[in-house]
Image (tube, grey):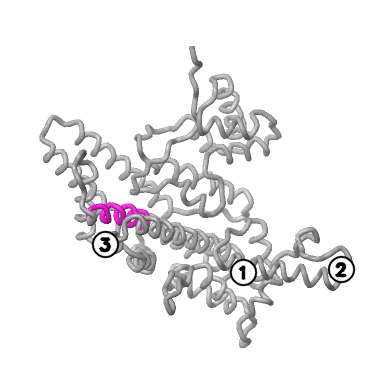
Amino acid sequence: MAQEKIKFDVPDSPFPFIPPIAELLGWLGGPTGLHTPIYWLHQDLGLDKPDLKTLRKACQEGVTPRIAEMIEANIHQGAREKGFIELLEEVVPTEPVVKATNGTKWLRAARGLLEGVNRHQSTKLELPRTFVFLEQRSLAEGQLMLAFHRANNMNVSQAERFSRMQAAFCESCRHHTLLAPQEIQIYANAIVDANRSGQPRSLELVADALKLTFSMRADFYHQLLASFTADMLPLRETLQLSADLDDALVKHGAMGQLTPKLKQGKLVTPTYQLYELWRGSFSAPNERPLSYRTMALHLPRPESSRTRVNENACLQDILDAADETRRRQLKEWRSGTVPEAGHLTKFLESLTGKTYGAFLPFIMTRAATAWTQWIEHELARLDSLVTQVPLLEDYINFEWILEKFSQYPEYWQHAMAQVTKGQPEP
């Protein structure tokens, strides 16, 4: 008889009311499963077993009870030694987890990340608006999934079940998203259509379902970013911002000037605009913006093994090749390549110097990179779908997606209105 397997992860749900956190982590080049932070914890504790391969298996396929007990004991040990009580919730959640939801995973990851950041900060960072948003959205997601489940199991007509599902979806969206009422109704119809089995679907309804998935995710990420940025406002003095970045934070929610746009038919990405902003923000007063050649010199000098020189190269050749490597890397970052965290930190600390802080620029770089990665993902996905069904472009196209990406300033205005009222809700 096969031995029971125990799995340590919470499955991701494809329902986009809250997108899977693995999606964002992938865009940031970070761990997409629970096994990586558990492995980091093992490294901190000096534990050799279980190894990374076993931890990955524990979070993806499941392991024997004996191995599971070992992993659980290690996590409890880490929680006791490091004071990370929240880590215990990874093994034994304090509240029931509704199936097909993603919110619990977001809350755990956010708490763990904040704990990790505060380990290295003299002034403890607090993110009240961010956590209020995540908690409310997570609760709403669970309630919506339960409402769908109850509707599907009611002894009533199919029309009545669909009506209840529509009502639950519309109610959740009205209270927890900034989607327009007309949009919400269209997407509610798409959800009902998706639950009708054995019936042909029009291309318009297929497009509406795709729009639903994208719009819900965009709403979540825009609200999350606006909430996090609003939590930065009380820290303005501590953040040591240049005049340009202080203006960007207050007036534009840090990222409002970086929304993607078309220029002469070519996409201008958030990362491209970010480094354009750095050119002006960190140049000397009354001087021309930094050139990219000068900016690249703030990257850490690469190791000799990574430079393109032959074995007979002189010192100047090696230095020139190293500078060329830095320029090439900066160009890759501007194009959306995910910077390694330590490398990015050293670059920003050098770029900002002793005058300004690097914390908000680091956050902005991470957000812009994820944004660019997401845009490229959506465009590739749309291209693939349109290649298969060319008429789909009549209902959903690049311009529509770009307009959605560009709505972040509206979310920042909403967040600022809540700040003005003195309310913690996003």
Q: Look at the image and say whether residue 216 sits in the magenta stretch.
A: yes
Q: Give whichever of discs 2 and 1 has the lower sequence position.
A: 2
Residue 349 as seen in the image, left or right of residue 244:
right
Place of residue 420 in the rendered image (x, y in percent of width and height, measured from the top left): 36, 67
Name the mark on residue 395: 3
Q: Is residue 186 above or below residue 153?
A: below
**Main SS of the magenta segment?**
helix
Q: Nearer the viewer, mark 3 or mark 1?
A: 3
Q: Is residue 240 above or below residue 7?
A: below
Span shown in magenta = 205-218
Q: Evaluate if marks 2 and 3 touch, with contact meaning CB atoms under 8 Å apart.
A: no
Amino acid type, label 1: Lys
Label 1: which secondary element: helix
Reading the image, the residue beneath label 2 is 313
Residue 347 as seen in the image, left or right of residue 365:
right
Along the line of sight, which residue is nearer the eye, 180 or 133?
180
Residue at (27% x, 42% y) in the render: 144
Place of residue 303 in the rendered image (x, y in percent of width and height, measured from the top left): 78, 60
Label 2 to label 1: alpha-carbon separation? 25 Å
Residue at (24% x, 45% y) in the render: 194
Q: Give whichever of discs 3 and 1 has the lower sequence position.
A: 1
Q: Evaluate if marks 2 and 1 touch, with contact meaning CB atoms under 8 Å apart.
A: no
Name the mark on residue 331: 1
Label 2: which secondary element: loop
Q: Residues within 10 Å of mark 2 (few under 14, many from 20)?
A: few
